[in-house]
Structure formats: C-alpha cells, structure tokens
Amino acid sequence: MQDLNGKTAVVTGAASGMGRAFADRFARAGMNVVLSDIEAPRLDEAVADVAAHGTGVVGQVTDVADADSVDELGARALDEFGAVHVVCNNAGVAGSVRGGPLSVADWKWVLDVNLWGVIHGHRVFLPMLLEQGEGHIVNTASMAGHLPGHSAYTASKWAVVGITQGLYHQMQAERTGVGVSCLCPGFVATEIHNSDRNRPEAAAPSALSAPTPEDEMRRAFMAEMVTSGRPPAEVADMVHDAVTDGRFWIFTDLALVAALAEKHDSIMENRNPAPPSFLDS
Ligand SMILES: NC(=O)c1ccc[n+]([C@@H]2O[C@H](COP(=O)([O-])OP(=O)(O)OC[C@H]3O[C@@H](n4cnc5c(N)ncnc54)[C@H](O)[C@@H]3O)[C@@H](O)[C@H]2O)c1
C-alpha cells in the first residue's frame, strides 16, 4: 500500500512500547488510527498523544485473547472510519522466564494473547481487507519465533511466524491485493519485561514455578537486554516502510539474524543443533 494518507490503521497493544510507536507513525503518515489495548488508563494517554497529529484517533479497550472483544474492536473501527486498511496484530506478553515447568495457566495465558490474538485479528479484519481488495496485515512475532527456546513465548512466536508466512503465500497466490509483513524484533526498549502487569488472576504463578536464583538472573538479564534495546520509534519507521514497500520480513537486529544461518546449516548438514552463538555472549 503506497498511499496511507486518509486511510485507517488498527493497532493492538497500542498503549505501550512498539504498538504505541506504530500508532504514532501511522498518524504522522496521515492515517486515522484505532488504538486498542487491555490497559485502559495508558490507552487514554496514548490516544491523547497520537491525536495531536490531527488525524482521526480513537481508543478501544480490547482483550485480544477474547473473540468477542476483537469482534467489538472490528465493529468500532468500521463504525468510526468506515473501513480498515492496515492492521497491526501486535499485543503480546512475555510470560514466565522460569527454567522449571510452567503451569497450564501460564501456557494458556501466553498462547491466548500472543497466538490467539493474531488468529482473532485475522478472523475479524481479513474479510474487510479482502472485500475492498486492499490492505496490509503486520503481525508482531519475534526473533524468538526462529530460535530455540523451551517456553510458551517461543511456542507462540514460532506459530505466529508460521501462520504469517502462510497467509502471505495465500494472499500472493490468490492476488488479493492484501499485503502481509512479519515483524521479528530483537530487543526493543519497551515494557515487555514487565508484562506480568497484565497477568490474569487465573494465570497466577503456580507453586511449581517458584522462581529459583537462576530464574531471577534470567529475568534480570532479559530486563537489561530489553531496556538497552532499540528505540520503538525506529521499529515503527521500519514497519511503515515495509507496508508502503510491500516487504514481508522486518528484522530489527541483524546480529541475531546471523544465528538463523547456524540453524539452517545444521539442518542442511543433518547434524545436532549447537546452541545459538549469541547465547555465548
Ligand atoms: N520488546 C522486545 O524486545 C520485543 C522483542 C520481540 C517481540 N516483541 C513483541 O512485541 C510486541 C509488543 O510488545 P512491546 O515490546 O511493545 O511490549 P509492551 O509491554 O510495551 O507492549 C505490549 C502491549 O500489549 C498490551 N497487552 C497485553 N496483553 C493484552 C491483551 N490480552 N489484549 C490487548 N493488549 C494486551 C499491553 O498492555 C501493552 O500495552 C509483543 O507481541 C512482543 O511479544 C517485543
């Protein structure tokens, strides 16, 4: 989609971090924006900031894990602006970074938000884009969607990479006019390391997963990597350009991408995988 001016974007997880930056970037490109998030007070703040660019901007409290809530988001967007053109399925949570077994509730929370959130986004918005023969879907996956990890987060992001690429091939083969991008960030300076703030009561950590000292070290390492990551506004520029240029992959950290080569080499040579080299650093 080359001309975004006057069109409409919907962004989930828009009260914080990357989603907020995407909303801001699309408003600066002249788009109306529907910001959605589960955190109401921060969503109000983000809406007020983004509205300063002078385009149509509204907020809709949404739980992307909940089918009805995403249905309501779609209806609100159509009601406000009559059409939707760019959809960023971006809301996400980190879940536990613990080494021990995760509870069923932990797995369910992360998969419900990170994977079902994207599935609901496709289910609700894709028919709108197909009907108008124009639009673009950007799914926020992660480098964790390419690299090994024994966590619900990794499982959710591998799944998002898979269905996003599948959707891209389908849209191309059927010449629908709908573009698709898969955003695979490395570390970006957001609040993702504090995503337990949105942990539902049903997913309260189980006694089984009481954090060990190693878990605490892992948590501190992740927080350090995230807070020293790329500014979200830089990623928002990359996302904007991928939409206007029709580019599928959006990688924010080429050093981590190099680790993918190791994975593919081990598959081609049929050898057991070595740990990704970035884990040595
Ligand atoms: N920051 C990183 O280093 C990094 C790296 C790779 C991928 N990602 C992915 O980027 C996306 C955006 O996260 P971020 O880094 O900006 O973190 P963030 O915590 O700053 O923003 C995530 C937003 O999602 C919202 N959210 C959480 N659960 C929700 C739900 N059920 N329904 C609707 N909204 C919900 C949060 O309230 C928050 O505003 C996520 O999918 C995350 O997995 C982040």
Image: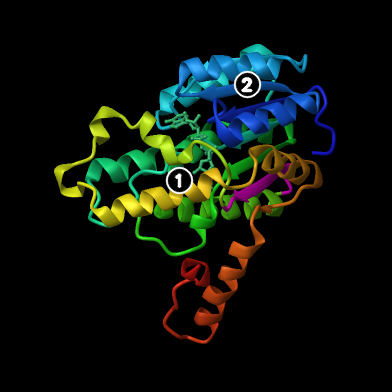
Q: Secondary structure at mark 1?
A: helix
Q: Amino acid at mark 1?
A: Ala
Q: Taking 269 as reference, is 38 above or below it? A: above
The kind of residue on which mark 2 rests is: Val
Q: Which residue is mark 2?
A: 34
Residue visible at 52% across and 46% down?
Answer: 226
Instruction: From this view, report whether residue 221 is shown above or below residue 196.
Output: below
Determine if the C-beta at disc 1 is less than 8 A from ligand 1: no
Question: Mark 1 highlights which residue?
Answer: 223
Corner quadrant of residue 255: bottom right
Q: Mark number for residue 63? A: none
- Determine whether, in the image, residue 120 is placed left or right of residue 97: right
Q: Tell me where the magenta segment starts and ends, as one range.
A: 175-186
Q: Residues within 10 Å of mark 2 (few under 14, many from 20)?
A: many
- 206 within the magenta span: no
Give the percent coordinates (x, y) of residue 31: 76, 24
Residue drawn 65% across the image and 12% down it = 80
Residue at left offset 37%, top offset 54%: 218
Which structural element holds mark 2? strand
Compared with 3, 163 (above or below) is below
